Amino acid sequence: MTPLAWVAVAALGGAMALARFLVDSTVATRLGGDFPLGTLAVNLSGAVVLGVLAGAALSGTAYTIVAGGGVGTYTTFSTWMLESHRAGEDGDARVLWLNLAGSLVAGLVAVALGHRIGGLL
Amino acid sequence: MVRLLTRATRRFDRRELGAIYAGGVIGALARVGLSEALPHGVDAWPWATFIANLLGAALLGWLVTRLGERLPPSAYRRPFLGTGVCGALTTFSTLQLELFKMLEGGYVGLAVAYIAATLIGGFACVHLGTVATRRARALR
């Protein structure tokens, strides 16, 4: 990784954190409810894109910048865990388990789907 | 993307967006730095993602509890540290791609152990960050 590649990771990382915030808040505002749909929308869309990149066999520094700095930053694990935890604390077991298991399974399907698409490119 | 960002800067507080960007830079550099320092094959434990995810979960549990229940609401700490740093440091897509590759390669046992440890560990980290902050408040 050259210094320029690190600069690219930083610049793209900041932009994709903003993109996550915008998509999350837009989805959450429009489809607001008990279930954290904003985070789910971010994570599933990111999983599809990462699957495409991996399926298209992108590699090396370009992959590290786009996949690591970009898509990796866009999706989030900490918010997924926090929202599940708080649903459990609020006594909403349905949201807790649906969010944990549903996101996990849907995320795997999303990556597999993206990988298929990427393989066709 | 540019239009989306232009619209967003009108709808949202610019300094809040700046705080998220700055936090995202730090989180992304830390996670990519970890993954460069700890590379792994498809048949090995992805330590970089594992550490980043658990660390970010603990930090977010602590932060949200502290800002939400202890300190008066701060305008920029949550966007910077929560949405920015923790959100960027942790990743859902890389975790899923690692799982997918393990399953595709036939390392089913590793995949099951990895997702179990990540989910249980991540949830426990949020819980510990939360409980420790509340206990610190109770002691005051």
Image (cartoon, rainbow, N blue to C red):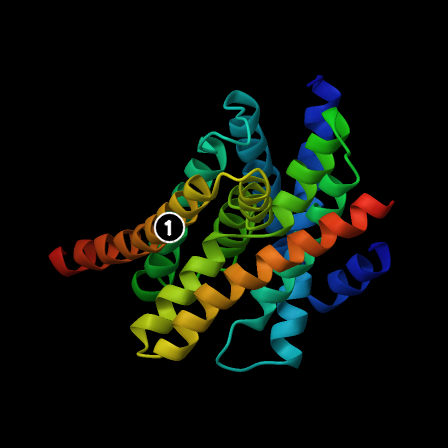
Please say whether residue B92 is visible from this viewpoint.
yes
Q: Name the residue located 23 percent from the left edge and 57 percent from the top edge.
A: B131
Q: In the rendered view of the protein, which quadrant contains the N terminus of chain A?
A: top right
- State the image coordinates of residue A9 (x, y, percent, origin top left): 68, 33
Residue situated in front as seen by the camera: B87 or B105:
B105
Residue, far left: B139
Q: Which residue is mark 1?
A: B116
Question: In this view of the protein, can residue B18 be seen by the observer?
Answer: no
Q: Does dot 1 land on a helix, a strand or a loop?
A: helix
Screen quadrant of the C terminus of chain A: top right
User: In this picture, is B11 found above or below B36?
Assistant: below
Could you tell me the amino acid type at mark 1? Ala
Chain letter for mark 1, please.
B
State the residue in front, A56 or A76.
A56
Q: Residue pushed farthest front?
A: B106
Query: Which quadrant would residue A72 be assigned to in this image?
Result: top right
Please give left or right for residue B10 compared with residue A107 in the image.
Answer: right
**Numbered circles on residues, count:** 1
- Which quarter of the picture shows residue B69? bottom left
Q: Residues within 10 Å of mark 1 (few under 14, many from 20)?
A: few
In the displayed structure image, the side of residue A64 where residue B92 appears, left or right: left
- Residue located at (54% from left, 27% from top): B41
Q: Is residue A33 above or below residue B79?
A: below
Q: Give the percent coordinates (x, y) of residue A87.
A: 38, 73
Q: Residue at x 46, y 53 (%)?
A: A78
Image coords of residue A39 (percent x, y):
57, 64
Please indicate whether residue A117 sits to the left or right of residue A32 in the image. Answer: right
Q: At which x and y percent is residue A24?
A: 62, 65
Q: Is residue A57 above or below residue B115?
A: above
